[in-house]
Image (cartoon, grey):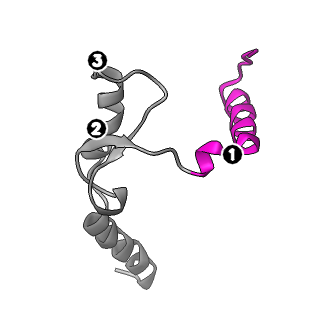
Amino acid sequence: MGSSALPGMALHQVSRLVGQSAEAGAWPSLMAATDPTLTGGEYLGPSGPGGLRGRPKRVGMSRTAHDEALADALWIATESAAGVSFEV
């Protein structure tokens, strides 16, 4: 094993300690799609320390989510990547 693989292995081990599996990472999306008590416009994320892992719960909106210029840029990039245009 070459030395170039070591940083990747280290990152993987750290991710396993502080993050969660892809299956568990999908829980907030599944909850958003199926929980009849949610009303829309709510944010869901992991309930554990630092919001890094755990069962989903309602969480606050991040500062980045309030950034309208970033939202506009994301919209444009998404339309470009998808090859479609949506008029809003």
Task: Name the quarter where the C terminus is drawn.
Answer: top right
Is residue 81 shown in magenta? Answer: yes
Where's the N terminus, which quadrant? bottom left
Q: Is residue 40 above or below residue 19?
A: above
> Does the magenta portion include 8?
no
- Residues under labels 3 and 2: Cα distance? 15 Å
Tell me the residue that label 3 is attached to: 36
Based on the displayed image, in which of its 4 quarters is residue 28 positioned? Answer: top left
- Residue where numbered disc 1 is placed: 67
Question: Which mark is first along the chain, 1 or 3?
Answer: 3
Q: Residues within 10 Å of mark 3 (few under 14, many from 20)?
A: few
Residue 27 disc label: 2
Dot 2 crowding, Cα within 10 Å, few <14, some 14–19, many 20+: some
Q: Position of residue 65 (x, y in %)?
A: 59, 44
Query: In the image, residue 54 lies at what x, y percent?
Result: 24, 51
**In the image, which residues are magenta?**
63-88
Q: Residue at x 33, y 65 (%)?
A: 15
Q: Residue 8: give x, y in percent of width and height.
A: 40, 72
| First along the sequence among labels 3 and 2 | 2
SS at mark 2?
helix
Whichever of labels 1 and 2 marks the residue nearer the N terminus, that label is 2
Residue 22 % position (x, y): 30, 46
Q: Main secondary structure of the magenta part?
A: helix
Q: Nearer the viewer, mark 3 or mark 2?
A: 3
